Amino acid sequence: MNTFFVLRHIIRTKAKSALAAAVAFSFILILSFLHGHITHVEYELDYMYESFVVRAEIRPGATIPPDRNFGDVIRWQTVDEILKSEFTKDELVQTVFRFAAISPLDEANSHWDDCIEYWLDWYTAVLDESGQIVQGTSVMVDANTSIGLVGFNDVDLFLAERAVGTAGHLIGNWEGRGGVDEDAACFETTQAKDELHIVFKPEFDESQFMHVAGEPIPVILSVPVMEMRGLVLGDLTYLCTMDDAIFTHSLALVVGTHNSVNLPFDPAFRDAVLMPAEATRVIFHQLIGHELGFISLSFDINPLWNRNLFKISEKLHEILRHSEAGFAPLTLVMRDEELRIVVGSMEQNLSLLRLLYPVAIVVSAAIGLGLSLLMILQNAKNAALLRTLGVTKARTRAMLLSVQMGVCLVGIAIGLAAVSIAGWGIEASAMPAGLYLSGSAAGSAIGAILLTNRSPLALLQVKE
């Protein structure tokens, strides 16, 4: 009798039944869409954080000391501290030194002590017994033989930067050891008209472009320098440097040639010796009174740390504020504008959706409760009829509740089927469906209790 009554009542009240099922269907669809959209935005946000690469650079500030003409003001300690950080990857460090030259070995492949001939057009220097220039004597450097050096730690990154442009390019009037014209000097990025190309000797692996203690320093020379010195790929030579009349001699192996395009700074570096940055530490250690400095340090922030860019920026600024960070004030440039703009708008949308979703669930449960209560209360005559026929209060309540819950279940089932077809994830719809069903059950139960607690005669007087 219960089943017959439920089905007959649902069929007789088609409009009410359709309304209850439609409301249940709509809320399941809306809540599932909101949840699916939240999941999609979270996925897109995670993808942006995990795939977007933020490039950062440490470079000289606006003031360059006269003895650091080319902006080599970043101390090695600062470079080490940043490179050992777990949030950096694909690091590129660069340093330059103006006074360098290539001195070939003699026929016996021994050290050529008199490499000064490859440095000076003429000189009035007086040498002491150890071959050093006596302090106070004059020396004039020959620009044709003093070619300078450029040190870096990653061939691919160095070439990529040279292809795009020279970041942090110091322009101005180079005035020898006297420094730069501070009024004319400034920093800018120049676009390369051509690209720097390097040709390595056969079977040479770029990963071997590094300094190994006790072995010759791998160097890359320009074609004119190799022709001038009579060198070919694979030859051993000496790399000489000079500072304050102190000469150094380091055995070097010619592993490649470059085309002298888009090398940094002064034209003297057009034919510069390219070498591993780590090897420059060894060379400069021999130059009394000259401490090695870097012109730039650039690196990618590990995408795993993209959510903590503010903390990383604070840590980097803390390092740069240290009095021993550089020979002059240093500047941090983080190219994270695009990430912050895109991610910022996505996070705002996500925050709004996360706020709306629980509100929508509560509203749906409240509407389910209210709608079911109203529909049960409109069954006063049916309740009176059942009570008059001798049906108990409990059974009457169960029959009225079954009618309303049956309609809600139909609407929820259709909604879940639509969610499944749309591919929004039926698992995520279970919770809002359960809450809506609970609200409907609570409203139906309250309405059934209110009806059955009244006498059949009073129920017959109720206008539905």
Image: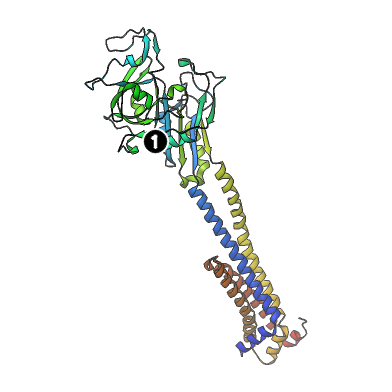
- Residue at x 51% of width, y 49% of height: 49
Count of numbered circles on the image: 1
User: Is residue 166 rendered to the left or right of residue 127?
Assistant: right
Q: Which residue is mark 1?
A: 155
Q: Position of residue 365 (x, y in %)?
A: 63, 69
Which quadrant is the C terminus positioned in?
Answer: bottom right
Instruction: Name the residue nearer the viewer: 15 or 93.
Output: 93
Q: Position of residue 66 (x, y in %)?
A: 48, 18
Instruction: Classify mark 1: helix, strand or loop.
Output: helix
Q: For residue 107, which quarter of the picture?
A: top left
Look at label 1 and name its amino acid. Val
Picture quarter with the N terminus: bottom right
**Frontmost residue, 352 versus 263:** 263
Query: As drawn, is 48 to the left or to the right of 220?
Result: right
Name of the residue lying farthest toward the left: 108
* Residue under the point 65% across and 90% down: 391
Image-based side of 171 in relation to 82, left or right = right
Residue 430 horizontal side relative to residue 299, left or right: right
- Say if 13 sits above or below 189 in the image: below
Disc 1: CA contacts within 10 A as few (<14), some (14-19) or many (>=20): some
Colour scheme: rainbow
Residue 60 picture location, percent across and down: 50, 28
| Residue located 78% across and 85% down the image | 461
Residue 129's image quarter?
Answer: top left
Identify whether 311 is placed above or below 8: above
Residue 455, above or below 309: below
In the displayed image of the protein, which residue is found farthest to the bottom?
389
Q: Quadrant of residue 450?
A: bottom right
Image x and y of residue 219, in percent:
34, 29
